[in-house]
Image: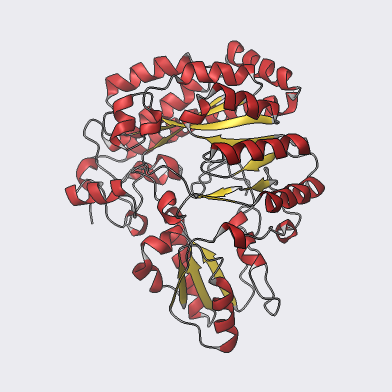
Amino acid sequence: MENRFNLETMSSISQPPVPLGVLAAATPREIETALLDEQTDEMRFDGDVFGFTVTTHFASRVYGFADELRAAGKKVILGGIHVTVRPDEAMRHADAIVTGEAEEVWPTVCADLLAGRLRPRYDGHPTPPSRTKPLDYSFFGNRRYLQPACLFATRGCNFRCSFCVSSRFHGPFRLKPLDVLEREIDQLSELHPDSFLQFTDDNLLGNREYGTEVLALLRRKRRRFAAMVTLDQFCDRDLVREAGESGCIGVAVGVESIDDDNCASVSKYQNVGRSVADAARWAGECGMQVALLLILGLPHDTPSRTARTLSALREIPAAMFDLRILRLFPGSDMFDTMLARGDVTDCWWLRDDPLPTNHVLPNHLRVYFRHPHFSATELQRTALEMTRDLNRMDPESVARALEVGRRRGDAAFAMTALAVRARFGSDASDLLERMDATTSAAVGCDERDSLLRL
């Protein structure tokens, strides 16, 4: 989609929906399958049976599609993280739902569908690594994704941050067999020889021994790659050097907050006592562009703290800063705790949005909870101002990113990182203007009360 302010997306970088490729591989050949991806395709519903993977952000939108399709006599199957944590809600909009990981139970769903005995609910379970099969990436066709070579080597996460629901959905931390991973890398190398590999794992290097084997495989294949890492891994100098020598050109790091009490308050203990600045400098020396992932709206955030945080972050040599507002997802410990206190709107994904600024901001900046030190619009304004200021295209930051690219011999990726940085900054400036226009027009809106209106 070409839409500078696409309010229904979480990212400006499109990539193939790899989980749907997993299901396609598990679908019997008697069933003809086709992918409909809103990132790249015109939304035309041609077919008899439609399966949707549902995330909380898009639940209301998917339910709308599902209701229309069922009214037209089509069958609808819903699955995904949101369906798993809110199965009763999802069943009102589907002929069948699948909870948990669908890979193992999907052949049964398909067999029942063909036999005309589709059940209302199927419960999936974590797929054992021994039963993992290589994806067939030809399923995604010639769609023009900005990051086409996406894959994962692990499932789940070995941490339990209280704001996260995906670690609970994906079950125990599991490792893909190296021979399966190698076949996928070979396939992607043939399909996208000029693209770097984008690992979508929550915690690619969470198992040190396996991570070393993955890095050795990538070094042998001579493939550039980017990945997400946790802060404790990012601060492991030997691991970061090893990753750089294996072809890593970029890392996204889940910092969330530079304040230890904020990290501890959301059970992100792996971040406590870490020096982000030192680790970022070392990663740059190893030839990696660094993206810091941050959350505003954690329990101990205050206006004075965010000013201090902004000053500290400016000293960190990162290629880009991706700042989002805390989102409370059903199924997370933090959602349950705040719901019991009356500080988050239950079923916010289904409500008519009472906060005017939520309508003009992208999903990752919308607010559906009460914060003890900020109003909703104060959180949004602060997030936008920090994003704008941290991603300024000043000469020092540009020169640093280009120097990191020179060390890796990859000027193209350095320019890509700078382009993303520039977009983050310019979009934040433009959204601030839209927010100003909206708040000026919203006369007499008591946002602290309307925010939690049921």
Q: Residue at x 34, y 31 (%)?
A: 263
Q: Does residue 34 lie above or below 359 as drawn?
A: below
From the viewer's perspective, is 398 left or right of 325? right
Residue that sits furthest to the bottom in the current view: 116
Residue that sits furthest to the top in the current view: 396
In percent of width and height, residue 259 lies at: 34, 24
Tell which of 345 and 84 is nearer to you. Answer: 84
Q: Colour mode?
A: secondary structure
In percent of width and height, residue 79 lies at: 48, 65
Q: Which quarter of the figure is the C terminus placed in?
A: bottom left
Is residue 378 visible in the rendered structure shown here?
A: no
From the viewer's perspective, is 314 left or right of 367? right
So how many labels did they put on this image? 0
Is residue 314 visible in the rendered structure shown here?
A: yes
Residue that sits furthest to the front in the current view: 209
Image quadrant where residue 439 sits: top left
Q: Residue at x 68, y 58 (%)?
A: 135
Image quadrant where residue 237 sits: top right
In percent of width and height, residue 60 lies at: 42, 61
In percent of width and height, residue 228 lies at: 55, 37
Tell which of 259 and 73 is nearer to you. Answer: 259
Q: Residue at x 54, y 30 (%)?
A: 424
